[in-house]
Image (cartoon, grey):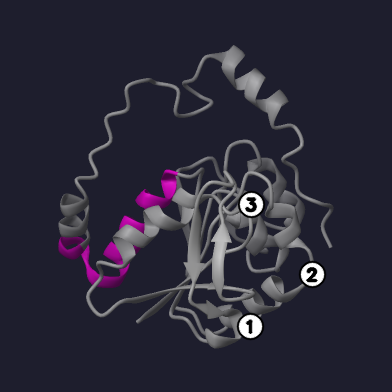
Amino acid sequence: MQIAILLYEGFTALDAVGPYEALAALPGATVVFTAERPGPVTADTGMLSLIAEANLDDVPHPDVLLVPGSSRSTAAQMARGPVRDWLSSADVHTSWTTSVCTGSLILAAAGLLTGRRATSHWLTLDQLAGYGATPERQRVVIDGKYVTAAGVSAGIDMALKLAGGIAGQPVAEAIQLMMEYDPQPPFGAGSPATAPADLVSQLRWRYRDVRAPASG
């Protein structure tokens, strides 16, 4: 089973690495990081790079496809070009097509979420509707073979759910236990529904430019 994780300049590191930790533990799984060009790909912090060992053409028929989001490069990946072309062609062959955070907008721009329920980072969730998807404010949304996760850390939840769907709950539980994934956050600010209202407003203002381009 080949699992392809897309990398592009400015991706969010945990969007890719969190699911990688869970999915790489699946029996028979081979994970490949792929990008337009092989080599180091720098995350949105500018301080971390992951290595893409394959270009897009080298991974035409992945069984599982995962698209991470970004705090600054989502719009560029939504534009017509090699990434959108690859997503459209690879999706024909996948058993599962997945995303984390604003990666769902990239899938939606490629036409893959039309008429489907999906989620995204809370700052951009409403934009899914402009690309024909039905936004749902949930941590993980499964609609057919399409599995989308909310912001960043939700990618781990998504990957564990996917692991259960692929290999069964006992396998997924073993992966979760070995990861010791037992979230006990120190603050109740992990969702706009529970965070202080002034903090939500501040972040909406600070990231007001994190918007997708017009549909097309």
Q: From the image, tell me which residue sits under label 2.
A: 80
Region of the chain picked out in magenta, as a range: 153-171
Q: From the image, tell me which residue sits under label 3.
A: 134
How packed is label 1: few (under 14 Cα within 10 Å), some, or many (20 or more)?
A: few
Between 146 and 116, the residue placed more toward the observer is 146
For the C terminus, the image quarter is: bottom right
Mark 2 falls on what kind of element?
loop
Secondary structure mostly taken by the magenta-highlighted segment of the chain: helix
Q: Seen in the image, is 189 located left or right of residue 108? A: left
Between 90 and 116, the residue placed more toward the observer is 90
Residue mark closest to the camera, 3 vs 1: 1
Q: Marks 3 and 1, Cα distance to the nearest angstrom?
A: 23 Å
Q: Seen in the image, is 116 located left or right of residue 13? A: right
How packed is label 3: few (under 14 Cα within 10 Å), some, or many (20 or more)?
A: some
Mark 1 falls on what kind of element?
helix
At x 82% / y 57%, what residue is drawn?
215
Whether residue 156 is in magenta: the answer is: yes
- Whichever of labels 3 and 1 marks the residue nearer the N terminus, that label is 1
Would you identify the image quadrant in which residue 133 lies?
Answer: bottom right
Q: Amino acid at mark 3?
A: Thr
